Image (tube, rainbow, N blue to C red):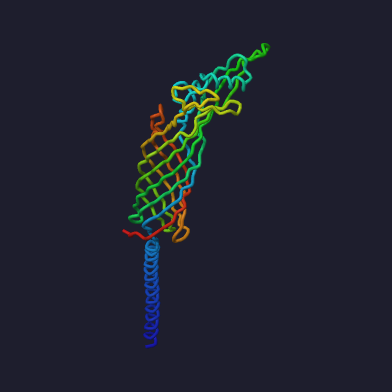
Amino acid sequence: MRTFLIIISVLCMMSLQSAGQDNVSVSKSQGQKKAQKHDWKGSDEVEKDTVVHRIEFGLNFGAYFPNKYSADFYNGTPGNVNNVNYVMSNTYWYRDIKLALGATDTVLVDGYPTNMHYNVAFSGGLFVRVNFNRWNSIFLQANYTQLRAEDVVTLRVDPYNTYLSYPDIRMVPIIGREGRVMIDLGYQLSIPLKSKINFFIQAGATMCYTQVIKSIFVVEGAEYNLVNVYGNNMYTPNTNSQTFNINQNSFGFGGYLGVGAGIPLTDMFGIEPGFFTHYYPVNLEGFPDFKPSFGLYLRIMLYFGKAGDD
């Protein structure tokens, strides 16, 4: 009897221990399921808490890196519509240039620019985007930039001192300035993250309007306009020489491709840094080819309304 009781006691202890282990295992399993369920719900709540605004407006501020190809429009070579020979062939301008350079005989053009290029320029403009959902949008933007192209023209000045063994070479600046309005219309694919940062890719069509503002070369501080504003007449000092309003402008159509990141700072305000490339012809006279240009920007965004989530 005593032995039987001892055996029953041992079996009961083993059964309780096993039940305890099973309960712990079940509790752990239920805890893991609850945690997974909580995590899934938390992820879903983050997804649903991300507001998709129907319309977004932005101000663009950035730097533009134009292709140097069309900068040669301003290099003053005889083949260009704006050329140095136009100034040098005018009796009165040529006389003034000789006096400014101290020449007693002749001043000849000895060389034209070999590295005519645009400087990096500031650009700015307006941006609007319509969101269909958190992934798909269309956008329209218009940006303006003013470009400056420059290099030097080499002039050979006949020396008035016969003992000089080397030619008198002068390098004078030649400068072009132009304005460009670039309008981009396209589609945006967004990649939203749980952190609410939104990476995106943009692609679309571009129209560029280019306006020549100035095309000059400068001799001893005096600017000489390479644009023929006198038509078939010749500039004559101290007379009412008739001038014409010469508009040198052009349109070019091409493509746009950009990437960026949307960073919301508040429910109504955010910023978007990004990078883009343009591929279009400037189409200034004599320069018809498609060339790529690049830009960087920081966009300040304002949000309005809400869009669907699907």
Relative to 231, residue 204 above or below: below
Residue 167 position (above or below residue 62): above
Q: How many marks?
A: 0
Which of 220 and 282 lies nearest the eye of the viewer?
Answer: 220
Residue drawn 44% across and 37% down? 293
Residue displayed at 60% across by 14% down: 105
Nearer to the camera, 135 or 31:
135
Task: Identify which residue, 137 or 199, lies in the foreground.
Answer: 137
Residue 38 x, y percent position in the rendering = 39, 68
Q: Is residue 193 above or below residue 153?
A: below
Percent position of residue 282, x then y: 41, 33
Residue 287: % across, % down: 41, 28
Give the x, y percent position of residue 45: 38, 65
39 sits to left or right of 218: left
Q: Quadrant of residue 168?
A: top right
Residue at image coords 42%, 53%: 57
Q: Nearer the viewer, residue 215 or 207?
A: 215
